[in-house]
Image (cartoon, grey):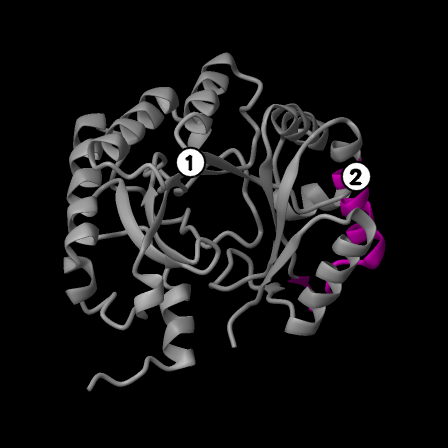
Amino acid sequence: MSQPVSTRRIRLIHRDHRRTFQENLYVYAVVSRRSKGVSIGINLNPDKVCNFDCIYCQVDRVTPAVVRGVDLARFREELEDMLDLIESGKLFEMERFRDTPPELRRLNDIAFSGDGEPTTFPQFFEAVQMAAEVKAKWNLPEVKLVLITNTTMFHKPQVQSGLALLRSHNGEIWAKLEAGTEGYYQLVDRTAIPFQRILDNIMAEARRAPLVIQAMFMRIHDQPPPQPEVEAFCDRLNEIIRAGGQIQLVQVYTVARVPAETYVGPLSRMEVDQIVETVERRTKLPTEAFYGPE
């Protein structure tokens, strides 16, 4: 009789979000705590170029990238091969996935989540179209297409076309918003893109269809986010709702892997719970907590 998988082992499985899989260049698989199952990841930024330089990011931007572009034909082949591994169960014969509990062995989504902002890829629409075609070919209507994004490019017409296509194929947009003020946004995300563009793009998209807000909070120089900043974050969410935007869920999470900067660290469970309580109390939005390493 097989032995139950320990809680510690499940945590290790959830923390393994490496964007490499055998010889693949663009497609990988993870057991995701936020997806609550297997997520196929699509990396449209193997060159590791990003328009954010987040202080908590785990991507190694010092080591030169081996892959510079995306070959869409190879991307499609890798996605088909990954689906075959998952649907046949062969993925869970691999050492890396062998201890995945039965309840987490279902394919939940195909997620555009890579080493940079997916919507900066010039052929973003074509990549979404290809993923949708493969999903339909495998008769997986219940599997979501997820875009994990900083929303910086949502105002671009070609990106708008890709978002509309994604939504029409059981798509979800997980939009990154982890600040309430310009100053804190620049402290955390380190970008030349103004905070107002993020707010405007999220608001415009939330008016079209419900989206998920992803909010990373952390200790910076051993200090949790100031309470006024958390309250300002709630104010931004309320502004989106008052303007007719739809937010289906707020995900509050903290650092789970080694961050870019050594002065960044995870919040305690109590600190995460306090932020969740503030968000729920001030916005009345459904909010979910995801904790750091334990």
Q: Kindly identify the residue that appears in the image at 63 percent across and 31 percent down.
A: 192
Name the residue type under label 1: Val
Q: Secondary structure at mark 2?
A: helix
Residue 122 in sight in this render = no
Q: Kindly identify the residue that appears in the image at 81 percent across and 55 percent down.
A: 281
Q: Which one is in front, 119 or 206?
A: 206
Q: Magenta segment range?
A: 219-238
User: Is residue 71 placed above or below 5 in the rendered structure?
Assistant: above
In the picture, which quadrant includes the N terminus? Answer: bottom left
Q: Which residue is mark 1?
A: 49
Q: Which one is in front, 6 or 196?
A: 6
Residue 85 falls inside the magenta stretch: no
Left or right placement of residue 120 versus residue 55 in this view: left
Q: Is most of the magenta stretch helix, strand or loop?
A: helix
Q: Which residue is mark 2?
A: 238
Tell me the quarter of the picture where residue 195 sits. top right
Q: Secondary structure at mark 1?
A: loop
Q: Which one is in front, 247 or 29?
A: 247
User: Is residue 204 placed above or below 98 in the rendered structure?
Assistant: above
Name the residue type under label 2: Asn
Q: Residues within 10 Å of mark 1 (few under 14, many from 20)?
A: some
Left or right placement of residue 146 versus residue 153 in this view: left
Q: Position of residue 124 (x, y in %)?
A: 38, 24
